Image: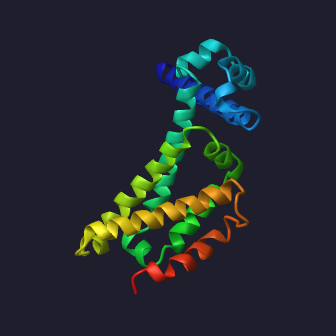
Amino acid sequence: MEERRRKAEYRSSIRSKTLIRNALVSLMQEKPFEKITITDIVRRADINRGTFYAHFKDSREVLERIRADALAEMKQAICSVSADIVIRNPEPLLRKISEFLSEDSTYYKMLLSTSGIQDFLNEIKRISLEYVMGSDYAKKQLDKESFASRLDFLISGIAGVYYDIVLGLIPQTLDTAPSFICRILKPYLPK
């Protein structure tokens, strides 16, 4: 009986957190994050303030949780392909990233248009750099400093292209992005 009660409480907690996160995402499509109040969130989620405060201390914490979850999912996508393969042919990884972003492009557009997004993008770059620098290919490079700088430049460019595509700033789609980016990268990839 006790086990059943704990499971029900857990499901209720997950449900409440999901309602809160979805409410914030929905509200952020209507107005800037800075103008969203706890009252706005609890009304949209159709929960009481006590439920909100049982899970989060403020709206910033909700946004940070959303970003942390998105970052964990992005890290999983990045690390799902061998770094040594990515160095020679980044298209499979770029396809995974495009598919990941396409699953909920409205959500990621909202996330990328919030204030403070630069920290999120820098974390994706850091994860990507560490991932590739840990490859056998990177370890064999004699001039690691130069290799890391070139890699940082390329990763920043790729992140920038995806950022601009998601926000609709360039006439490119997530479907065509991997082949487009690979054509640009081709001269920089090892033979």
Whether residue 72 can be seen here: yes
Q: Position of residue 105 (x, y in %)?
A: 69, 52
Q: Position of residue 154 (x, y in %)?
A: 46, 67
Closer to the camera in the image, 39 or 81: 39
Q: Position of residue 58 (x, y in %)?
A: 56, 21
Q: Residue at x 59, y 71 (%)?
A: 178
- On the rendered image, what quadrant is the C terminus found in? bottom left
Q: Position of residue 176 (x, y in %)?
A: 67, 71
Q: Residue at x 43, y 80 (%)?
A: 189
Q: Residue furthest right?
A: 30
Residue 142 in the figure: left or right of residue 117: left
Residue 135 in the figure: left or right of residue 174: left
Q: Residue furthest bottom?
A: 191
Specify how the rendered protein is coloured. rainbow
Numbered circles on residues, count: 0
Whether residue 102 can be seen here: no
Q: Residue at x 51, y 76 (%)?
A: 185
Q: Residue at x 47, y 78 (%)?
A: 89
Closer to the camera in the image, 38 or 11: 38
Q: Is residue 89 above or below residue 7?
A: below
Q: Is residue 162 above or below residue 68?
A: below
